Image (cartoon, rainbow, N blue to C red):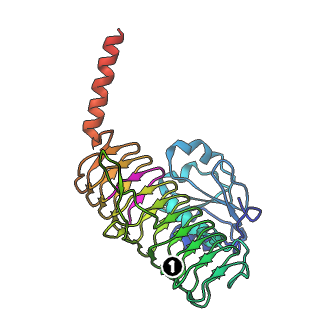
Amino acid sequence: MGAAGFFRLDRPLTPAEVAEIAGARLHEAGSGVQEIIVGVAPLDLARPGELAFYDRRRYASALRLCRATACLLRARDLDSLPSRVIPLVTSEPHKAMARVMARLFPDSLRPQSLFSASGVSPGAIIHPTARLEPGVSVDPGAVIGPRAEIGSGSVIGPQAVIGPDVRIGRDCSIGANVSVICALIGDRVILHPGARLGQDGFGFALSPEGHVKAPQIGRVIVQDDVEIGANTTIDRGATRDTIIGEGTKIDNLVQIGHNVVIGRDCVIVAQSGLAGSCELGDFVALGGQSAIGGHITIGEGAQIAAKSGVTRDVPAGARWSGAPARPVRRHLRGELLLDRQSRREAR
């Protein structure tokens, strides 16, 4: 997957340059001073001119047949690499590959202007009181409301809506059809297409006579280096702020309710749902389709498995799974007992 793809190759790299970028060692058995890398590909599809990486033993057969120009791999796997492939030895092949891909295809790291333009498009609608620093790009159809502020180097995609008084920091990417209201956004934040930030939280005072809507007057605070996936929704707070901590990465189709507080460098995978007023400590990881109940606290470094339903507080560093969620070992023992019982009944 090289220069013919959707992302422009910045420039070819030699194996020695790849090794330097990746923090890898160009193995002494490798040659190829005249070789260049112009693309990347999986082990089984890579061809001359491309870089591959090997990180899991399940792909050992593909490694033995690899035809790439060079391959990032661990020292223990050198014997399985064909002699024609240049070995680049590293303890973390996947991470090394990410670094090299970022250098080869820098435009792939965040949404760019869909018109490959700089400056403000004549087709954008910007309120006279909005303030844009020099170097902001705004695509056609974008709407920027009164008193909004956007920092230099940021890109506002087509049909994006930036509400009144919203502040967006520097070097941010706001994708197509994103809406941001009642929010303060830090630097280097990425919002992928269709994300919705700052809309009403789901707040009602319930009664047999009818449900009374509770005003949601808080904000969404997104700190630096956060990435938010396509069609994810983050409600503004009711009487306090919804906060997304620095460096947190949120996948597509995630729902985050009002008053939620998420710590630094958390990872939240697709289709997860966080109910109002729950709190996540730093470095928490939520698997896909996990559900976190309201007013629940998940401690620092905890991991919640996919499809888990969390109904009570989770201590720091714990690993929970199941619905209702509980410590992984206990959940698996329970599943094993149920399986044994069903086998007995079947006999």
What secondary structure prevails in the magenta region?
loop
Three-letter amino acid code at the position of disc 1: Pro
Q: Answer whether residue 267 is magenta in the image.
A: yes
Q: Quadrant of the C terminus?
A: top left
Q: Position of residue 140 (x, y in %)?
A: 71, 75
Q: State the residue in front, 258 or 96.
A: 258
Above-or-below relation of 305 to 101: above
Position of 279 with respect to 73 (left or right) is left
Q: Answer whether residue 285 is magenta in the image.
A: no
Q: State the residue in front, 39 or 217.
A: 217
Label 1, on which residue?
164
Position of 89 with respect to 313 (left or right) is right
Q: State the residue in front, 283 or 130.
A: 130
| Mark 1 Cα-neighbour bin, 10 Å: few <14, some 14–19, many ≥20 | some
Determine the residue positioned at 24% across, 37% down: 330
Above-or-below relation of 270 to 109: above
Q: Quadrant of the N terminus?
A: bottom right
Residue furthest to the bottom in view is 134
Q: Position of residue 157 (x, y in %)?
A: 64, 72
Determine the residue positioned at 34% across, 58% down: 284
Residue 113 picture quarter = bottom right
Q: State the residue in front, 187 or 42.
A: 187
Residue furthest to the right in view is 4
Q: Position of residue 329 (x, y in %)?
A: 26, 39
Residue furthest to the front in view is 209
Residue 14 picture quarter = bottom right
Residue 183 picture quarter = bottom left
> Which stretch did the figure color magenta?
265-276
Q: Is residue 287 visible?
A: yes
